[in-house]
Amino acid sequence: MKVPSIRFFSKENVKKSLKNRNKFKIAYPEYRHSAVLLLLFEKDDEPHVILTKRANNLKKHKGEISFPGGKIEEGDESLLDTALRETEEEIHLPREKIEILGELDDMFTLTHYVISPFVGYVQYPFDYSPNKTEVEYIIETPLHVFLNKDTFSEKLFDFHGKKFPVFYYQYDEHTIWGATAYMLNQFVEIVFGFNPSAHPEIKRLNPEEFQ
């Protein structure tokens, strides 16, 4: 598989790629809804993604690498509002600094959440800092990490007789996996046409298949 070049990255191309498709939405009332923000910026002439290492004192997913985001709460006007609010709370980045470029497909987790991913862009340089009650530290991750088959691996997971791949990306000492890796995989497939998975046909589309 030919690895695409990030030289052709621009926020305009990302916006166009996300606009020229139909987002897959999951309406499943038994699952709780949440939203995350895949936030892009350009530093040293290279696109980056903001990831966070979750604090070790959290009850769920402690110490894992994730996007800013969380579950929808009372007072949120929309799932986009949820993603922006959580970003402000977790990394102290004001929503006014963020340009929304589009959305990825909804995905579900085996912990009974539906995640709605939004893609945003922030002009570098910008001020931000981790909320230490939720985030141990912030990881400025070069986008090329997710366009390199050598940083990627996967394992087939069997759940009640249904198989689906779990993706892993390695960046220095950080292992990015699970839902975050799945969304990054979809992002680079949509924008760059690159998917290193041996099972690209298996998608998490129907939660009922995993009951």
Image: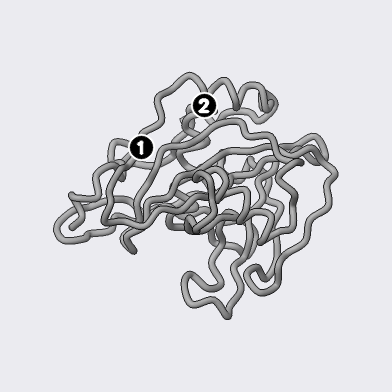
- Tag 2 secondary structure: helix
In this view of the protein, which residue sits in the foreground, 97 or 175?
97
Q: Residue at x 69, y 43 (%)?
A: 48
The answer to whether 109 is drawn above or below residue 96 in the figure is below
Task: Provide the secondary structure element on which disc 1 rests.
Answer: loop
Q: Residue at x 54, y 54 (%)?
A: 75
Quarter in which the C terminus is drawn: bottom left
**Above or below — where is 24 with respect to 60?**
above
Which residue does the numbered mark 2 point to in the structure image? 18
Residue 203 point in image, percent of width and height: 31, 41
Q: Amino acid at mark 2?
A: Leu
Residue under the image location 55 percent in, 58 percent down: 66
Position of 115 compared to 89: left or right? left
- Residue 34 position in % (x across, y down): 45, 53
Which residue occupies the foreground of this view, 126 or 50?
126
Q: Residue 150 vs residue 53: left or right?
A: left
Amino acid at pointer 1: Lys
User: Residue 25 has which mark?
Assistant: 1
Nearest the camera: 149 or 54? Answer: 54
